[in-house]
Image (tube, helix red, strand yellow):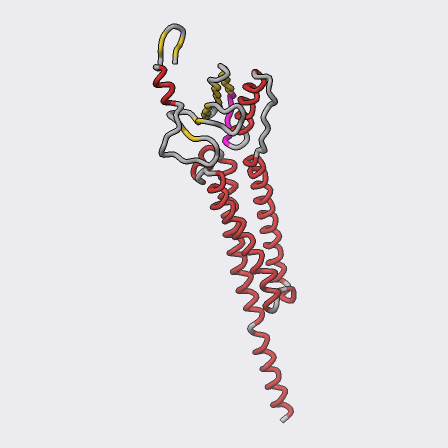
């Protein structure tokens, strides 16, 4: 807590900042002190914190070794940069200690890239569904008929897309521990991709309603028409 010969924070104040609060329980191996994350998933255990906006910074301190490392980057991305910069910071700490550089799978980056692939597949499949519906309208003979055809060709794609949208819009933010509104603010590309997934699922739902209505319109007159023909034929025979 000193800068040059001046005391900025008392030793007791520094110690208090690095204490684990008694009211906070965590199974992740680290908790939050007064402005510092206490304990990390890396070895050696220490104290760290990061911040960003149009930039990104990460600072780690290991009092037992006497080392502290600060990494500053003039750009920011909550998903693509947070974990790599964190690994870089603790990697420098370990290099200074002549220890192996820590490695950790970047699950968030994989989910980030996977989201765009899934949304792209949703968009392409919805476009294909639109062309299919147009073909059903112009050529009624290709329209799904019967319970199983309607279920497999109309109901199942709708349910799958609604499930995907629910997982992306509701489940994924809860999994990463960041609300959708925060993702829209800090990572607008990822947040809007999640919202787009929900919009595409709504498009699938509208497509399904139109397709089912058209299927019913094509199916209902057939028995009536057939019954009418039999009645006319019977009358003529009589």
Residue 24 lies in quadrant: top left
Res 22 → quadrant:
top left
Whether 77 is among the magenta residues is yes
172 or 76, nearer to the observer:
172
Q: Is 91 placed above or below 117 here?
A: above
Residue 181 can be seen in this image: yes
Is residue 199 at least partly visible in the picture?
Answer: no
- Residue 45 lies, in percent from the top left, at 50, 24
Quarter of the rendering containing residue 10? top left
Asked whether 22 or 172 is in front, the reply is: 22
Residue at point 62%, 52% (across, down): 128
Q: Residue at x 62, y 84 (%)?
A: 230
In which quadrant of the rendered image does the N terminus lie?
top left
Q: Quadrant of the C terminus?
A: bottom right
Residue farthest toward the top in the current orientation of the protein: 5
Residue 168 in the image, given as x and y percentages of width and height: 51, 45
Q: Main secondary structure of the magenta part?
A: loop
Instruction: Locate residue 214, reporting x and y percent.
Output: 55, 65
State left or right for residue 36 relative to residue 142: left
Q: Is residue 82 above or below residue 62?
A: below
Camera-side residue: 124 or 58? 58
Q: How many marks?
A: 0
Q: Bounds of the magenta span?
A: 73-78
Q: Is 172 colored magenta in this rendering?
A: no
Residue appearing at x 60%, y 90% in the figure: 235
Q: Residue at x 53, y 64 (%)?
A: 213
């Amino acid at each position: 807590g000193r800068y040059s010969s001046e005391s900025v924070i008392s030793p007791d104040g520094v110690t208090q900042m690095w204490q684990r609060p008694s009211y906070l329980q965590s199974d992740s191996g680290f908790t939050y002190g007064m402005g510092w994350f206490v304990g990390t998933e890396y070895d050696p255990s220490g104290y760290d914190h990061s911040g960003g906006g149009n930039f990104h910074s990460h600072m780690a301190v290991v009092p037992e070794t006497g080392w502290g490392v600060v990494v500053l980057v003039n750009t920011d991305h909550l998903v693509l940069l947070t974990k790599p910069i964190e690994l870089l910071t603790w990697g420098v700490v370990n290099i200074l200690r002549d220890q192996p550089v820590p490695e950790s799978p970047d699950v968030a980056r994989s989910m980030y890239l996977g989201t765009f692939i899934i949304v792209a597949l949703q968009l392409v499949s919805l476009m294909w569904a639109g062309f299919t519906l147009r073909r059903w309208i112009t050529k009624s003979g290709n329209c799904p008929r019967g319970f199983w055809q309607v279920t497999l060709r109309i109901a199942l794609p709708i349910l799958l897309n609604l499930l995907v949208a629910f997982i992306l819009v509701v489940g994924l933010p809860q999994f990463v521990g960041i609300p959708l509104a925060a993702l829209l603010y800090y990572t607008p590309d990822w947040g809007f991709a999640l919202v787009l997934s929900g919009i595409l699922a709504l498009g699938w739902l509208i497509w399904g309603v139109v397709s089912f209505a058209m299927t019913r319109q094509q199916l209902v007159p057939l028995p009536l028409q057939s019954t009418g023909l039999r009645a006319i034929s019977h009358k003529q025979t009589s």
